């Protein structure tokens, strides 16, 4: 790859501005400052700056990182989009320079995640189910009943909330709910985890801009040996 010391220096000098722009784009889906996800973004910035400065791509340093691969990939894309937005008329040049670096970093993330899965418990095959859910027109969210965090979502949910689907993973579902609607959501989440009957109700979501979205929801319990999920289908009213 070509050397771009000017772009490397620009990324370092505009780091704060790029972060603020990314956080504004992600809204409630933004990573917390002390999370592994934020550490991955920091390591990518260092990796990208060094590669642009030297004109060579080194091996990304991912030791000790245990972030969700899908979510981190979405966050990297959000960071890249934010950097291009801040770069304005140099955005295309920056995207072109970052593209091979993002590809190399994503590949390293995938390899690291695959190694962890190989060392851990076997992964269940959910590809057919996931593909079917992705084609559902209504918004779908699977929420861990104990933690309240989103463990799966479909593209329609991302479109409804104004953020990439994978950026929703591991985020607290109530981050996308106005405070005035929290009690309604908790009431139905608690009820469905205690009983097998589906619940139908109306409530509100809040997208990344802070706009309120009235929705009609159906919520169903799905239990495994390890945890209970609340499966939510939401349709804007």
Image (spheres, rainbow, N blue to C red):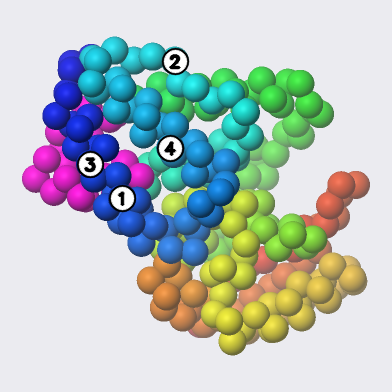
Q: What residue do we see at 35% from left, 51% from top?
A: 19
Instruction: Measure how far apart labels 3 and 1 are at the Cα level.
Output: 8 Å
Q: Quadrant of the N terminus?
A: top left
Of badges 3 and 4, the one in the foreground is: 3
Element type where label 4 sits in the image: helix
Up-down: is 83 above or below 99?
below
- Sequence-earlier tag: 2 or 1: 1
Residue 13 badge:
3
Sequence order check: which comes first, mark 1 or mark 4? 1
Residue 84 on the magenta segment = yes
- Report the residue marked by disc 2: 59
Q: Is residue 25 magenta?
A: no
Q: Is residue 135 visible?
A: no
Does dot 1 land on a helix, a strand or a loop? helix
Residue pointed to by mark 1: 16
Decide whether the magenta segment is chiefly helix, strand or loop: helix
């Amino acid at each position: 790859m070509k050397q771009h010391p000017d772009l490397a220096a620009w990324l370092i000098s505009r780091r704060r501005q790029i972060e603020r722009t990314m956080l504004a784009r992600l809204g409630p889906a933004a990573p917390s400052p002390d999370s592994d996800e934020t550490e991955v973004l920091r390591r990518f910035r260092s990796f990208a700056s060094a590669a642009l400065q030297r004109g060579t791509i080194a091996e990304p340093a991912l030791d000790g990182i245990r972030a969700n691969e899908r979510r981190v990939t979405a966050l990297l894309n959000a960071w890249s989009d934010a950097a291009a937005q801040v770069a304005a008329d140099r955005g295309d040049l920056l995207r072109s320079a970052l593209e091979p670096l993002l590809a190399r970093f994503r590949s390293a993330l995938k390899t690291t995640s695959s190694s962890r899965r190989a060392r851990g418990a076997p992964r269940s095959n959910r590809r057919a189910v996931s593909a079917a859910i992705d084609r559902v027109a209504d918004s779908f969210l699977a929420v861990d009943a104990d933690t309240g965090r989103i463990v799966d979502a479909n593209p329609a949910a991302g479109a409804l909330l104004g953020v990439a689907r994978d950026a929703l993973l591991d985020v607290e579902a109530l981050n996308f709910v106005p405070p005035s609607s929290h009690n309604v959501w908790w009431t139905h989440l608690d009820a469905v985890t205690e009983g097998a009957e589906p619940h139908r109700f109306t409530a509100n979501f809040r997208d990344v801009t802070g706009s309120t979205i009235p929705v009609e929801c159906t919520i169903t319990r799905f239990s495994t040996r390890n945890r209970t999920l609340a499966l939510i289908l939401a349709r804007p009213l």
